[in-house]
Amino acid sequence: MTKVKLTYTVDLEDIPNEVSDMLLKTYWSLKNTTDKLDQPVTENNVAGVIELIDNVRQSLADIDLKLDDCYSILIGYLGAIRSNSIENTKELSEKLSELENSLGNMKQKNESD
């Protein structure tokens, strides 16, 4: 089966919930996949177990892709919130400097009057 990347846009603050939903779906896929492995191997079902193992391995590969998507999204999210934090700090520093300059100018003006 051909795999394609699906892209959509959400607000930055919605990313943790979106990834949580993705992880929950992935969890249930993993649980359903591993639940299939609880049957014993007998002489009568070897071929069926071989097929089962192949199906489980393919499902695990799909699960790994989903986990990699979650991982990549969260790495991007972490970078975005760190970047926003740095920008906010710079903005606050600039505003503080402006305020200090304004107060200094007001003080000088009052002293000269």
Image (spheres, grey):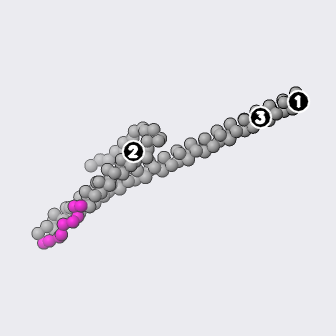
* Pointer 1 or 2: first along the chain: 2
Cα–Cα gap, marks 3 and 1: 14 Å
- Pinpoint residue 12: horizontal percent, then vertical percent: 47, 41
Residue 48 vs 72, above or below: the answer is: below
Residue at coordinates 45% horizontally, 38% vertically from top-left? 11
Label drawn at residue 103: 3
Residue type, mark 3 in image? Leu
Q: Is residue 17 left or right of residue 110?
A: left
The answer, for residue 88, to whether it is visible in the render is yes
Q: Quadrant of the C terminus?
A: top right
> Dot 2 corresponds to which residue?
18
Q: Is residue 96 left or right of residue 110?
A: left
The extreme left residue here reads 44
Residue at coordinates 16% horizontally, 68% vertically from top-left? 46
Please provide the residue range marked out in magenta: 35-43
- Pinpoint residue 28: horizontal percent, then vertical percent: 29, 54
Residue 15 vs 64, above or below: the answer is: above
* Pointer 3 or 1: first along the chain: 3
Decide: few, some or many residues near mark 2? Use Cα within 10 Å; few <14, some 14-19, many ≥20: some
Residue type, mark 1 in image? Ser
Residue at coordinates 36% horizontally, 48% vertically from top-left? 22
Decide: few, some or many residues near mark 1? Use Cα within 10 Å; few <14, some 14-19, many ≥20: few
Q: Are marks 3 and 1 in contact (CB under 8 Å)?
A: no
- In the rendered image, which quarter is residue 50 located in? bottom left
- Pinpoint residue 61: horizontal percent, then vertical percent: 32, 56
Residue 4 vs 105, above or below: the answer is: below
Q: Secondary structure at mark 1?
A: helix
Q: Closer to the observer: label 1 or label 2?
A: 1
Q: Is residue 41 magenta?
A: yes
> Dot 1 corresponds to which residue?
112
Residue type, mark 2 in image? Glu
* Pointer 3 or 2: first along the chain: 2
